[in-house]
Amino acid sequence: MRPLAVLLLLAACGGHEATQPRVSAEPISVRGWIADVDEPANAPYRTRETEIARKMQLFRSTNIWIENAPYVSGGVAENGSFLLLDVPPGNLTITFSAPGAPAAWLVLQNVPGNADVFVPGLVLRRDSVALLDPKLVQVRMAAQVSKPSPTGAKAIIAGTTVAVTNTPYNAMTDRHDYPNPPGDMTPLATVR
């Protein structure tokens, strides 16, 4: 084969590979839990037992995904907790699809590589999410520090600006685990 033909062939192949999806070199993890779906109550009587059954069915029926990120793994557990691993950093939208909220979008912006994003108490809406307590959202980075300290960077999670925090390595062991939501979730009336 002629050298020019070889160069053209390599150039053609190289351009094709660049368009293929890849796992990020600095993937992030996104964890949290769903508190409920923001929808009118259909049942005339709500008891603790009917709410537990309703939420279990709700969480079983919930799907979660990120467009154009085929290597993301994870899902939603029966208790409403969710975990996504190998998520690309930067700006992205996580879509939740649940009864009453066919496309609830959790928007993350400016998330640095290798971060752990913790988003507790999501309330799914038809086209967005609400946070029960925005102050509980965390963006952590594993670092060789003795105690959590701010990095100076900021991320935006569901419209809330969150300081990115350097966190000791030994405090980051939970970043690959489904979180445990509290047993008694805050009522929807307190959604901000």
Image (cartoon, grey):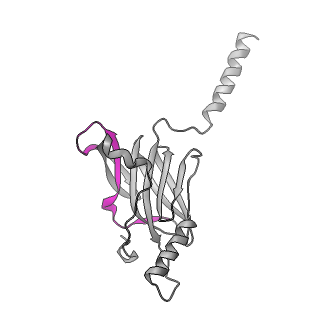
Please identify the quarter of the rendering in which residue 4 is found: top right
Asked which quadrant contains residue 136, the reply is: bottom left
Name which residue lies at 42% across and 66% down.
130
Which of the image's four quarters has the C terminus?
bottom left
Q: Is residue 33 above or below residue 36?
A: above
> Is 143 included in the stretch rendered in magenta?
yes
Task: Residue at 57%, 71% (x, y): give it.
Answer: 99
Quadrant housing residue 22: top right
Residue at the far top: name it.
2
Give the answer, above or below, for where 8 lies relative to 32. Answer: above
Q: Residue placed farthest to the bottom in the image?
A: 44
Residue 165 shows in the view: yes
- Image coords of residue 55 (percent x, y): 50, 72
Residue sitting farthest toward the front: 49
Tell me: 72 left or right of 147: right
Name which residue lies at 37% across and 72% down. 184
- The spot of residue 187 in percent (x, y) is 38, 76
Above or below, 111 against 58 in this view is above
Vertical placement of residue 44 versus 129, above or below: below
Magenta residues?
Answer: 128-152
- The residue at the point 39 percent across, 61 percent down is 120
Q: In the rendering, at what x and y percent does residue 35 appear?
A: 43, 68
